[in-house]
Amino acid sequence: MTAVSRVAVAGSGVAALATAIQLAKAGVSVTVFEAKPGLPTLGSGITIQGNAMRVFDTLGAWDDIRAAGYPFVGLSLRAPGPGAPVVAELPDVNSGGPDYPATMGMPRADLARILFEHAVAAGAEIRFDSKVTGLEQSDDSVEVFVNGESAGSFDLLVGADGLNSTVRELIGITTKPETTGMGIWRAFVSRPAEVAHSDLYYGGPMYIAGYTPTGEDTMYAFLVEKAQDRTGVTDDEAKAIMIEQSRAYDGPWNAVRADLEAGVTPNYTWFTKHLVEGPWNRGRVVIIGDAAHSCPPTIAQGAAQGLEDAVVLTELLVAADTLDDGVWDAFHARRLPRASAVVAASVQLGQWQLDGDREADAGGLIFGIAQQMAQPA
């Protein structure tokens, strides 16, 4: 027996698809409603830590994900200026344990495709162009409205519909993401042979400049600046901004600028933070992933935390006979402290940059969080 037999999932990001995979594998009927017309085909890359790899293995998707990504060990800190000298080499903490690489980069579109394929193979139904627009709950079910019309009754609705979650709003949770004061330019570019792992540049005109390999021939590069209103910036203007702002950085950044000049288009987003500190459910509706918490990518744990939400939630649902307060209490006890620690540490790392705090122990904070993530969720 499972606590649920028919589940609706809003969203098609990593937390949503991980939920769909695990429940469908357990014999639960799962319908995923995604407002967009299809999976993303563009975007930059994503950095994956060991605890996320551990979840992918639980999903049965790890072999495919590893084959599509670029595993690596270590992190270099470089200084701006001629030659981009390496000032420190930092070892990674293997938060997934000895069975997985310490860190891996991969294209976001490939990750989305692989998880989608595993969800469909497990038996989940995926409906695109299908936005959850309303819900009505009773004691034993929740009626879900999609594109303004009833899509039927379900035992549970999982809101994994991202930062600007409609499900979060529908259940009356008023916590919303707010900017941390930083913005980031990202570009998906070719990987020079000398880039074997992530490099971060501190100093110069940007808060942080860096890049992470995502494949044998690809990587994503990024510049972190003071958050600005970049709406209305054209593609050509975006390229020019990223080229000019990166001129203080030498070494592999020369190849990044060459790709931008050749036509690669960057994208821009603000760093956000939020945490729903109380229960993430209201009756038979629960939010997870970016709907429940968000943080700057300063320790690359955002996606990992959403994946952990999904695995813990589905583990409890499959093990229980009924969906009662015991399930929700266990879920929140396992997820709230861990997600809270990641959000707080990620925001603190960025705040130290904003404050220009040269005495801050960034390495100690990163190491401490990595040690926590090494323990299974």
Image (tube, rainbow, N blue to C red):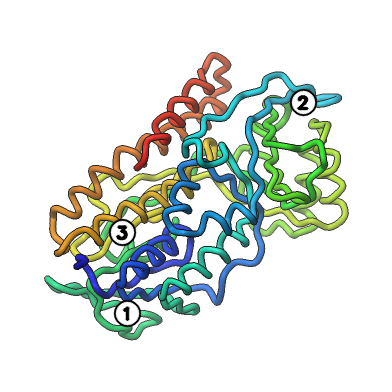
Residue 89, x across and y down, in percent: 66, 22
- Local packing at callout 3 (Cα closer than 10 Å; few below 14, some 14-19, many 20+) is many
Q: Which quadrant holds residue 205?
A: top right
Q: Label 2 is placed on what type of residue?
A: Pro
Q: How far apart are marks 2 and 3 (CA)?
A: 46 Å
- What residue is shown with label 2? 80
Q: From where the camera sits, is residue 138 visible?
A: yes
Residue 106, x across and y down, in percent: 64, 51
Q: Label 3 is placed on what type of residue?
A: Thr
Relative to 357, is 210 above or below?
below
- What residue is shown with label 3? 314
- What residue is shown with label 1? 145
Closer to the N terminus: mark 2 or mark 3?
Answer: 2
87 sits left or right of 370 in the view: right
Q: From where the camera sits, is residue 230 visible?
A: no
Q: Label 1 is placed on what type of residue?
A: Phe
- Local packing at callout 2 (Cα closer than 10 Å; few below 14, some 14-19, many 20+) is many
Q: In which quarter of the image is the N terminus?
A: bottom left
203 sits left or right of 52 in the view: right
